[in-house]
């Protein structure tokens, strides 16, 4: 079995966790969603964003920044099954690089230091603006005591959610996938920008990225991503994290997390132009997709809005 196939099998368990709970609310919620007004696509290569934060679900409930105790399965909680994401960083500076330091503790209250390698990394870390116009995907480093450090590029003022995606290599949660998160505030004058309207394609670094598929909330559905350049199909995609493209999605309004699992087999440095993904988005509304792919040793990040009915 290829590394991409093994990853697909393991990761599907994570998507399934939130699906059952979400289905109970899907019919009521889907009728109340509204499309965002159109603007220039907001996308961040791990640098800056000019959009402000809209209130997150945790803020609406009165939580303080960095203290999130919400339903598990969508990444909007800092705790699940006895595992907890902890950090002393409730604020981060704006306009310059900064390190976000955090620890994962286990059911015994001790820092976890044994993590399984997943897509070539032991920890995947995401910083996402609450309005989904800022995005960074990093692979932090861990000290001997279990403290992780994520070197963030410049953050614009507003509210950001920090996601840690990992799989313990030992203990009660061994081989189980977790996505935990906490919020931080970046002080300053935040400028509000609406989420770009749903579209079928977007452009980045001279490439055209097209997404085909009409997923329904709470149901498994395939998505196809096609990549072209100068009107010609791209066939020189290089493996990135054991796949030809890494795709994550965040839900408008609460920034709920979903990972879309790649199903295309990796066969060297000639991937493309069509890539398939197993999509299981638990709730309706607009989702912001961030697709990362590599050509010629350069990583590209494309973003577009997908509406889920």
Image: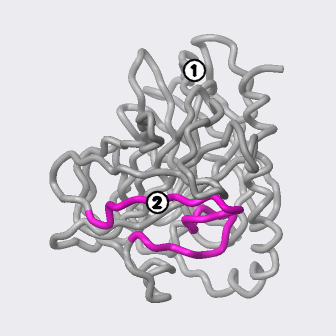
Measured as percent of width and height from the top left, residue 16 is found at: 80, 57
Instruction: Sort mark 2 into few (<14), some (14-19) or many (20+) by Cα contacts within 10 Å.
Output: many
Observer-nearest residue: 235 or 284?
Answer: 284
Residue 119 locus on image (x, y percent):
62, 30
- State the residue at coordinates (69%, 41%): 224
Q: Are marks 2 and 1 in contact (CB under 8 Å)?
A: no
Helix, strand or loop at mark 2: strand
Earlier in the chain: of badge 2 and badge 1, it is 2
Residue shown at the point (38%, 56%) measured from the top left: 41
Q: What stretch is highlighted in magenta?
A: 66-91
- Count of marks, rendered view: 2
Position in image of residue 37 (x %, y %): 42, 74
* Pointer 1 local density, CA inside 10 Å: few below 14, some 14–19, many at least 20: many
Q: Disc 2 and disc 1: Cα gap in Å?
A: 32 Å
250 is within the stretch colored magenta: no
Residue 71 forms part of the magenta stretch: yes
- Residue 35's tag is none
| Above or below, 210 relative to 141 | below
Q: Quadrant of residue 296?
A: top left
Q: In this view, does 21 lie to the left or right of 242?
A: right
Q: Residue 86 carries which label?
A: 2
Label 1: state its secondary structure: loop
Query: Quadrant where the C terminus lies?
Result: bottom right
- Whether residue 301 is visible here, answered yes or no, is no
Asked which colour scheme the image uses, the reply is: one colour
Nearest the camera: 135 or 271?
135
On screen, residue 23 versus residue 309, left or right, reads right
Q: Which mark is residue 239?
A: 1
């Amino acid at each position: 079995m290829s590394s991409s196939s093994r990853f697909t099998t393991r990761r599907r368990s994570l998507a399934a966790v939130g699906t059952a709970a979400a289905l109970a609310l899907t019919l009521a919620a889907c009728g109340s969603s509204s499309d965002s007004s159109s603007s220039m696509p907001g996308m961040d290569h791990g640098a800056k964003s000019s959009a402000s934060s809209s209130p997150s679900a945790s803020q609406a409930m009165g939580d303080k920044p960095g203290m999130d105790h919400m339903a598990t399965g969508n990444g909007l909680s800092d705790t699940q099954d006895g595992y907890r994401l902890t950090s002393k960083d409730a604020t981060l500076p704006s306009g310059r690089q900064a390190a976000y330091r955090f620890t994962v503790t286990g059911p015994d209250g001790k820092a976890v230091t044994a993590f399984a390698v997943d897509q070539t990394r032991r920890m995947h870390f995401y910083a996402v603006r609450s309005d989904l116009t800022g995005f960074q995907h990093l692979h932090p480093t861990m000290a001997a005591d279990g403290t992780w450090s994520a070197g963030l590029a410049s953050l614009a003022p507003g509210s950001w959610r920090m996601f840690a995606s990992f799989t313990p290599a030992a203990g009660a949660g061994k081989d189980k996938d977790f996505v935990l998160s906490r919020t931080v505030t970046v002080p300053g004058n935040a400028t509000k920008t609406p989420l770009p309207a749903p579209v079928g394609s977007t452009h980045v670094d001279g490439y055209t990225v097209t997404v085909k598929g009409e997923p329904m909330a709470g149901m498994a559905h395939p998505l196809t991503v096609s990549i072209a350049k100068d009107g010609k199909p791209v066939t020189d995609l290089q493996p990135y994290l054991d796949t030809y493209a890494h795709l994550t999605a965040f839900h408008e309004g609460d920034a709920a997390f979903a990972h879309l699992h790649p199903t295309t087999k990796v066969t060297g440095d000639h991937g493309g132009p069509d890539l398939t993904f197993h999509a299981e988005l638990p709730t309706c509304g607009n989702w912001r997709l961030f697709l990362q792919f590599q050509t010629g040793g350069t990583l590209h990040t494309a973003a577009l809005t997908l509406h889920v009915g």
